[in-house]
Amino acid sequence: MAGPKLALAGRKPYLRRNTMLSWAVTFLIIAIIAAVLGFGGIAGTATGIAKILFLVFLVLFVVSLILGRRPKV
């Protein structure tokens, strides 16, 4: 019984890190579809949200690269 829990525990941090990027991509796709269909206000809003989420993701990614994983002492 403990085996599957350990396997899932290893995946959760990976999923949490990619959640913000997936939301940014989702809003970018919504913005592209809205722009093609001619919904200017919705496209602009979705584009703005996608840009903000992508920049936050990028900053967090750079910070995690700089700090990295610290070895256990």
Image (tube, rainbow, N blue to C red):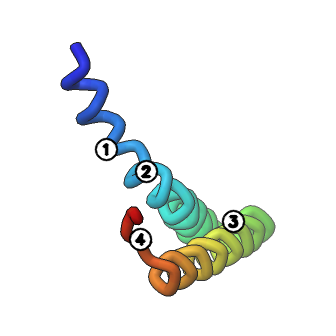
- Name the residue tied to disc 4: 69
Secondary structure at badge 4 equals loop
Residue 18 rendering spot, x and y as whole percentages: 45, 59
Position above or below: 28 against 59: above
Q: Are marks 3 and 2 in contact (CB under 8 Å)?
A: no
Single out the mark in the foreground, 2 or 4. 4
Work out how far the residue at label 3 is from the one at label 1, CA to CA, in angstroms.
Answer: 32 Å
Residue under label 3, please give it.
46
Above or below, 10 against 56 in this view is above
Residue that carries the numbered disc 1 in the rendered image: 10
Front tag of 3 and 4: 4
Q: Amino acid at mark 3?
A: Ala
The amino acid beneath tag 1 is: Gly
Question: Helix, strand, or loop for circle 3?
Answer: helix
Determine the secondary structure under disc 1: helix
The answer to whether residue 69 is left or right of residue 4 is right
Query: Residue 12's image quarter?
Result: top left
Asked if the residues shown at circle 4 and circle 1 are in contact, with their CB atoms under 8 angstroms apart, the answer is no
Q: Earlier in the sequence, mark 2 or mark 4?
A: 2
Q: Residue furthest right?
A: 41
Tell me the CA gap for discs 4 and 1: 15 Å
Res 13 label: 2
Mark 2–mark 4 Cα distance, whole angstroms, equals: 13 Å
Residue at (56, 68) in percent of width and height = 28
Task: List x then y, in percent, for residue 46.
Answer: 69, 65
Dot 2 amino acid type? Pro
